[in-house]
Image: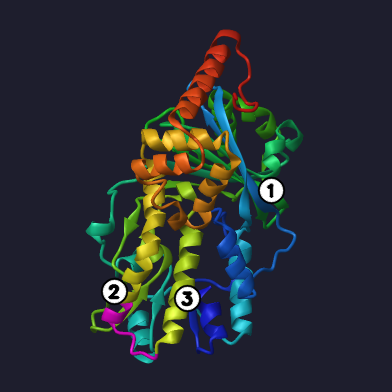
Amino acid sequence: MLSAALLRAGWRVSLCSDREAEDFLADRGRPTACLFGDQVEYEAELGLDFWPEAPRMRRIHLDLATDDGAVAFAVDAPLRKPALAVDQRLKFWRGLRELRGRGARVTVGRVTGADLEELAATHDLVVVTAGHRSLTGLFERDPARCVHTEPQRRLFMVNVHGYDTAARPEHEEGVFSFLPGTVEVFWVPFHDKDVGESRSIVLEAAPGGRADRFCRVTTADEGLAVLKELVDELLPHESAFLGPARATSPVTWIKGEVTPVVRRPVGVLPSGRHVLGLGDAVVLNDPLTGQGANNATRMARFFADELTAFDGPYTPEWLAGRFDEWWERGRYTNEFTNRMLAPLGEAQKELILAASHHPEIAERLWEGFNDPASLAPWFFEPPATREFLARCDVGRWDVLRYKLGVGARVVAHKLFKRPLNGPAAP
């Protein structure tokens, strides 16, 4: 997106890719990369919205499960603007062709340190956006902005079709399944390269926990079989939906783990010349809140505006200063993700429980996926959370009543095995 924005502003752009456009179509599956409202609109503004047929996600349904397979309560509300997830193989293929057609000089091949030196010597600015280890090594870890030193989740993703939406109509839109301390599963409406409308299922398992079962998986079919067993055991209300599902292709799956990190945005080459890092090259979050592509898009938009408005030179000090300015809002993406990776505090639990009864609160929560800064301070600071609930006419007695309702439903499930995937108790 940065290249498209700079081309629109009249810049001469050289774009380095490690493969030709058509090579992306033959690639294996890539991360889901769901864009939320503002980022979807910016993509369209740049003329990069090539898939009008792709399914839009217009609301999110969240189920909070218990250890014995019940659904304690659900949160359901619309998104203020639709979200969109398109297969990155399609996006990279079409995007590379489009940028070349708009005048970008495209060079294909792996970029080495010597290449960066040559580029830095012949261009006003070199921007590294790839998260490959050989390039991110240019950018020092920023300990003041880092929270984690090791992965917080084990990840598995598979794209599927053939599922039974009639068995679970909530899957017409996005569904999140949370079993706190064990697993989070995201069921995202997706436009797949091979089958079109599908669902991308992203699972995040607590290391060493009951859902950490994918380390020995070697194929999409093996992974999907493990996923179905896990769902039957831990999230049985999703079994009928997932049961008939098939992988969209043998290569549309991923497993692994991510160590969240924030790096310093300016890298210095051996010659003393410098490069700017953006996207995953400098800010890498766990995918739990779906912020990777969104964060990169926000960063590209900010820097495209800043670079265009400034007549240079683009010194390391100026670039670092702009990154600090971006971080004033961008830090909330990291804070949102890190808070969701950790056990929720009591105030946040009460907030989410209140959202199960008040769609307007849920809508404010869902807006955090589009703009994490919109959650400040009421999602992050307990006193602000309770002030926010009070402004929404949710008092302490209301919260107590909601908790008692959940407790009664859980007890009823244990005693009578009643399904708990209906509406929350009044």
Element under disc 3: loop
Q: Is residue 25 visible?
A: no
Residue type, mark 2 in image: Gly
First to last magenta residue range = 311-320
Could you tell me how far apart the alpha carbons at marks 3 and 1 are, in whole angstroms?
32 Å
> Looking at the image, is 34 positioned above or below residue 413?
below
| Mark whose residue sits in front, 3 or 2 | 2
80 or 191: nearer the eye?
Answer: 80
| Residue plotted at (61% across, 22% down) | 420
Mark number, residue 109: 3
- Location of the C terminus (image quadrant): top right
> What x and y, as percent, mark residue 140?
25, 65
The answer to which quarter of the image holds residue 220 is: top right
> What x and y, as percent, mark residue 53?
75, 60
Could you tell me how far apart the alpha carbons at marks 2 and 1 are, in whole angstroms?
40 Å
| Mark whose residue sits in front, 3 or 1 | 1
Q: Is residue 315 magenta?
A: yes
What residue occupies the far top of the structure in this picture? Answer: 415
Q: Which residue is labeled 1 in the image?
A: 198
The answer to which quarter of the image holds residue 144 is: bottom left
* 2 or 1: tag closer to the N-terminus: 1
Using a 10 Å C-alpha cutoff, classify the residue at mark 2 as few (fewer than 14 neighbours), some (14 to 19) or many (20 or more).
many
Mark number, residue 249: none
Element under disc 2: strand
Q: Which residue is labeled 2 in the image?
A: 267
Q: In the rendered structure, are the residues bearing label 2 and label 1 in contact, judged by CB atoms less than 8 Å apart?
A: no
Could you tell me how far apart the alpha carbons at marks 3 and 2 are, in whole angstroms?
21 Å
Using a 10 Å C-alpha cutoff, classify the residue at mark 1 as few (fewer than 14 neighbours), some (14 to 19) or many (20 or more).
many
